[in-house]
């Protein structure tokens, strides 16, 4: 099914959105992991509500310290600086997230590839900087998930190419959101929303009503393309508007095709709906690279995961299971 942005049915959903003024709702916003973290949860006890909100923020900070490429002491930075010289021991958590990333690279025909950073680190979207074609050509061979070698006995990782760098920007926020929901469940919370940038996961509903989660219009930040009533699931959006600059009439943004080392441009945004934010996050990035046809083929053979794509002509596309709903 294809439609135009903001169809009447979806507008109706948007109008159902209401404010957040319940007495026992706890809420916090903080800037962590280079993005906005938002938590809303319901608790009958003020102490439990405050503690649970803080525990989510602490988890976001912990993952940032572990996986940020901008923090020199992070495990990720340590792996990037030494991984091509010798095997680097890492935590089980980082080892497992990198292993999952490589599994996803295989399943997405290399569209999701954390070694994109071998070229990707030369882009600076805030400073309007991009690598020259010669630099891309020199480093392109380093983009290949097969260079990542695992030693599961000692939880160490080795890069079998001298120029490999990895970056978990396409999966770490989803992982952080899943961990946060796990923490809230352990604390007995039953209704919550956790968002890290484009990655949202919902625990339960909003006390008998669905959560209303928006997908913004990729070319207008105050307009919603769709608002979806959701409960007990996750939604991640990848868009070409998050980090970008324009030069010579072209948009240079933060989602790179591993094949070319340049921004993927077949679509403007991809949203994935599914239970695990870690997978939603990686799949939204992968489908962004794959484009409408290959992306939908992938989603339509991935049970439990659905996609809404806004293509580069601003047409919307829905995966098969969503088409049946509407
Ligand atoms: P964000 O919420 O930061 O916009 P996305 O889920 O849209 O995150 O993913 C974009 C991020 O994924 C980039 O900032 C970069 O760190 C990483 N990335 C870019 N291209 C790829 C790729 N082809 N494979 C894996 N990760 C990528
Ligand atoms: Mg993503």
Image: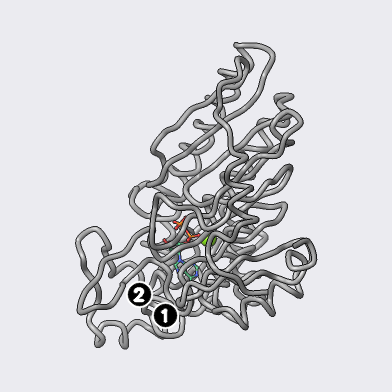
Point out residue 269 in the picture as x, y percentages from the top left corner: 49, 66
Q: Residue at x 54, y 33 (%)?
A: 39
Q: Quadrant of the C terminus?
A: bottom right
Categorize mark 2 by other alpha carbons within 10 Å: few (<14), some (14-19), many (20+).
many
Instruction: Determine if residue 63 is in view.
Output: yes
Tell which of 263 and 55 is nearer to you.
263
Mark-to-mark CA distance, 1 and 2 = 8 Å
Extreme residue toward the front, this view: 8
Q: Residue at x 54, y 66 (%)?
A: 270
Q: Secondary structure at mark 1?
A: helix
Tell which of 281 and 193 is nearer to you.
193
Relative horizontal placement of residue 13, taking residue 77 as reference (left or right): right
Labelled pair 1, 2 in contact (Cβ < 8 Å): yes
Relative horizontal placement of residue 205, taking residue 269 as reference (left or right): right
Q: Is residue 5 above or below residue 236?
A: below
Categorize mark 1 by other alpha carbons within 10 Å: few (<14), some (14-19), many (20+).
many
Residue beneath disc 2: 119
Q: Secondary structure at mark 2?
A: helix
Does ligand 1 reach within 8 Å of label 2's beta carbon? no
| Quadrant of the image occupied by residue 263 | bottom left
Does ligand 1 reach within 8 Å of label 1's beta carbon? no
Relative horizontal placement of residue 128, taking residue 27 as reference (left or right): left
| Quadrant of the image occupied by residue 132 | bottom left
Instruction: Determine if residue 155 is in view.
Output: no
Q: Residue at x 65, y 39 (%)?
A: 211
Residue beneath disc 1: 142
Q: Quadrant of the N terminus?
A: bottom right
Point out residue 295 in the picture as x, y percentages from the top left corner: 62, 77
**Sequence-wise first label, 1 or 2:** 2
């Amino acid at each position: 099914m294809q439609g135009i942005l903001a169809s009447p049915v979806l507008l109706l959903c948007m109008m159902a959105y209401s404010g957040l003024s319940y007495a026992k709702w706890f809420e916090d916003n903080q800037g962590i992991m280079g993005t906005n973290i938002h938590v809303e949860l319901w608790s009958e006890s003020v102490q439990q509500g405050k503690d649970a909100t803080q525990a989510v923020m602490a988890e976001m900070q912990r993952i940032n310290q572990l996986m940020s490429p901008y923090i020199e002491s992070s495990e990720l930075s340590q792996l990037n600086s030494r991984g091509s010289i010798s095997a680097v021991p890492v935590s089980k958590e980082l080892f497992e997230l990198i292993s999952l990333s490589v599994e996803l690279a295989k399943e997405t025909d290399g569209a999701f590839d954390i070694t994109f950073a071998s070229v990707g680190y030369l882009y600076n979207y805030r400073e309007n900087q991009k690598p020259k074609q010669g630099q891309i050509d020199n480093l392109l061979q380093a983009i290949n998930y097969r260079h990542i070698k695992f030693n599961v006995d000692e939880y160490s990782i080795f890069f079998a190419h001298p120029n490999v760098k990895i970056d978990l920007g396409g999966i770490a926020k989803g992982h952080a959101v899943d961990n946060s929901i796990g923490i809230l469940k352990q604390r007995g919370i039953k209704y919550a929303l956790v968002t890290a940038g484009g990655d949202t996961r919902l625990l339960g509903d909003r006390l008998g009503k669905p959560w209303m989660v928006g997908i913004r219009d990729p070319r207008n930040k105050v307009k919603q393309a769709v608002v979806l009533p959701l409960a007990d699931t996750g939604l991640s959006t990848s868009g070409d508007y998050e980090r970008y600059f324009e030069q010579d009439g072209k948009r240079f943004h933060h989602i790179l095709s591993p094949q070319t080392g340049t921004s993927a441009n077949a679509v403007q945004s991809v949203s994935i709906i599914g239970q695990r934010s870690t997978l939603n996050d990686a799949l939204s990035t992968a489908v962004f690279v794959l484009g409408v046809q290959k992306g939908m083929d992938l989603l339509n053979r991935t049970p439990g995961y659905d996609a809404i794509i806004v293509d580069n002509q601003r047409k919307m596309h829905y995966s098969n299971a969503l088409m049946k709903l509407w």
